[in-house]
Image: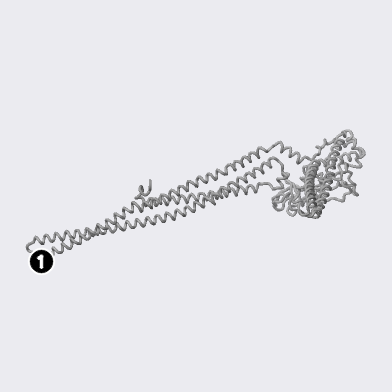
């Protein structure tokens, strides 16, 4: 069926229909542009999400938990999914939307030309019909005048009272009107023939051609919509297998998570290698003997500090605002080369990692040396290939590197042997210490006049101390502690001993009370917020850095500016 034959009289309706069709195609193109933007925006947000939550390379290497590894794999798969959405967006914007835009422009131009021609044909037909109507009205007027002139002649001719001249005059007038009527009739007939021919041509040839081209244009537009719908679906369908593959990867990453293995990794990562502390012995102070109590107390304190100190290393490192509140200003929290500051298990682990790294480097340098030796042999056999002397320098450098690596390997192997020896000695010492009986401990409390256990004074960190005579810190390696006696008779333990002892306690000693003069908001690590008029305990005095450590009524501790508070110290402080 053709528009030219079936819709010959629907020129205006076809004009509206084709215009709406082009507007629909244009609207569909806008829809695809917006969808492309959404796909691109979604992909960009996914990539930003991945970037924000993907662990740094160093963190990824250090964190070997299955949950972390699975999370990293999941994040990478999400990043790949974002890439597929970018493919969809690029295909839509670069290909489909461009084709639709070009087609809309082409259809608009073609429709404009066709309707311009159709309007021209319509105008010609209307002009012809106008002229036909004009000639018809002239013919009707002339016909009526001829009839009237003829009737007048008949009346005059029948009237015997009129002269012959009047009759002839009436006859001549009637004949003129009759001839004029015939001329108008001829003009009307000719115009009618032309109009009929033009109308026949208009409805049988000219306008059907216009309508047929409009029909072809409309079918091309509809075919474009159909093709674009299929292509968009195919494009999305092509990326679905890749997205499914990414989702399968996420499922595989989730299935690879092993709770039991992660629990073992926690043990491997944080196990110190120390044994739990022994039971605290009973000290019978009613029967002191010759300083045994002092030795027992000092030994017990050293044992307790050695074990508990390993559990509070992290606490001491994090204490204070950016480490400016530390009592020992010269302390540097750095891991030593031999890792001697780490617990036994962790030390062995770090040393083994270093040994493995050095062995890998030695293997690389050995492979490079073998390659240089082969190259040198080739050059010696065929001098055209190269100069053997040029390889000598590289071999010398390689030998120096290997020697350094071998020395470093031997050094760290020595550290490892030392660590393993310390572990055995630690177990042996603990076995010996556990063999002490309660009876021997009670007998050791004899000489209270030489060493009174109650003479130990636990002071808060930052309390001014007098000059000490000896060091009793656990790091000194001394098994028992003999505090020195100053001129005034008071015993002052070593500051490091005090700090290590106090940090392992649940709370520090209270030096006094305080009251906030102004409100303060703690924003840095180690600081604490107070409101004006709030009361609290003082647990550490200002050491010259402008900060005082306090303990609030809810047992929260932190540092506040000294100038913001008013302190009331106890007499013994």
Which residue lies most toward the left here?
Answer: 160
The colour scheme used here is: one colour
Foreground residue, 166 or 312? 166
Q: Quadrant of residue 259?
A: top right
Residue that badge 1 annotates:
165
Q: Position of residue 2 (x, y in %)?
A: 38, 47
Mark count: 1
Q: Secondary structure at mark 1?
A: helix
- 40 relative to 143 in the view: left or right: right
- Mark 1, Cα crowd under 10 Å, few <14 / some 14-19 / many 20+, is few
Q: Position of residue 237 (x, y in %)?
A: 55, 43
- 74 relative to 273 in the view: left or right: left
Quarter of the image that includes the N terminus: top left
Foreground residue, 162 or 372? 372
Foreground residue, 160 or 59? 160
Which residue lies most toward the right here?
Answer: 290
Q: Position of residue 99 (x, y in %)?
A: 50, 51
Evaluate whether residue 497 shows in this view. Answer: no
Identify which residue is drawn at 52% across, 46% down: 232
Q: Position of residue 432 (x, y in %)?
A: 87, 36
Foreground residue, 286 or 543? 543
In this rendering, the answer to whether 135 lies above or below 307 is below
Which residue lies most toward the bottom here?
Answer: 165
- 128 relative to 564 in the view: left or right: left
Evaluate whether residue 112 shows in this view. Answer: yes
């Amino acid at each position: 069926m053709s528009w030219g034959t079936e819709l010959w009289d629907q020129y205006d309706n076809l004009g509206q229909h084709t215009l709406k069709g082009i507007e629909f195609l244009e609207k569909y193109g806008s829809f695809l542009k917006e969808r492309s933007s959404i796909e691109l925006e979604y992909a960009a947000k996914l990539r930003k999400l991945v970037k924000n939550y993907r662990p740094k390379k160093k963190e990824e290497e250090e964190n070997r938990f299955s949950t972390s590894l699975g999370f990293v794999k999941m994040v990478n798969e999400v990043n790949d999914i974002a890439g597929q959405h970018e493919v969809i967006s690029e295909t839509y914007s670069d290909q489909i939307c461009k084709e639709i835009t070009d087609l809309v422009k082409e259809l608009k131009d073609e429709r404009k030309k066709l309707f311009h021609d159709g309007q021209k044909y319509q105008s010609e037909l209307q002009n012809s019909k106008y002229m036909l109507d004009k000639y018809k009205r002239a013919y009707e007027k002339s016909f009526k005048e001829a009839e009237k002139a003829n009737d007048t002649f008949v009346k005059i001719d029948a009237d015997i009272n009129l002269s012959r001249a009047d009759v002839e005059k009436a006859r001549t007038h009637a004949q003129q009107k009759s001839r004029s009527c015939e001329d108008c009739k001829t003009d009307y007939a000719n115009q009618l023939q032309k109009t009929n021919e033009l109308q026949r041509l208009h409805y049988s040839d000219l306008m059907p051609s216009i309508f047929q081209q409009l029909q072809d244009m409309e079918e091309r537009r509809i075919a474009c919509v159909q093709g674009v719908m299929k292509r968009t679906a195919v494009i999305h369908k092509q990326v679905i297998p890749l997205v499914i593959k990414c989702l399968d990867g996420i499922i595989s990453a989730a299935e690879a998570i092993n709770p039991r293995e992660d629990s073992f990794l926690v043990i491997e990562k944080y196990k110190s290698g120390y044994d739990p502390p022994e039971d605290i012995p009973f000290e019978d102070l009613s029967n002191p003997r010759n300083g045994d109590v002092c030795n027992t107390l000092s030994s017990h304190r050293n044992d307790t500090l050695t074990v508990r100190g390993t559990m509070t290393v992290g606490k001491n490192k994090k204490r204070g605002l950016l480490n400016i509140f530390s009592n020992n200003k010269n302390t540097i929290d750095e891991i030593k080369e031999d890792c001697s500051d780490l617990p036994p298990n962790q030390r062995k682990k770090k040393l083994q990692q270093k040994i493995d790294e050095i062995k890998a480097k030695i293997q690389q340098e050995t492979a490079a040396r073998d390659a240089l030796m082969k190259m040198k042999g080739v050059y010696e056999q065929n001098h055209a290939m190269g100069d053997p002397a040029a390889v000598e320098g590289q071999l010398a450098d390689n030998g120096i590197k290997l020697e350094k690596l071998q020395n470093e390997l031997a050094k760290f192997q020595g550290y490892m042997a030392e660590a393993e020896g310390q572990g055995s000695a630690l177990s042996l010492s603990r076995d010996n210490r556990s063999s002490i009986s309660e009876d021997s401990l009670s007998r050791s409390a004899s000489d209270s006049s030489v060493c009174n256990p109650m003479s130990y004074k636990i002071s808060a960190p930052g309390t001014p101390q007098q000059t000490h005579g000896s060091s009793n810190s656990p790091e000194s390696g001394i098994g028992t502690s003999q505090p020195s006696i100053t001129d005034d008779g008071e015993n002052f333990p070593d500051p490091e001993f005090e700090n290590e002892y106090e940090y392992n306690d649940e709370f520090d000693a209270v030096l006094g009370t305080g009251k906030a003069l102004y409100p303060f908001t703690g924003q840095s690590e180690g600081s604490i917020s107070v409101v004006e008029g709030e009361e609290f305990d003082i647990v550490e005095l200002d050491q010259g850095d402008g900060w005082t450590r306090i303990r609030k009524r809810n047992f929260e501790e932190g540092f506040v500016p000294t100038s913001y508070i008013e302190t009331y110290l106890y007499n013994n402080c």
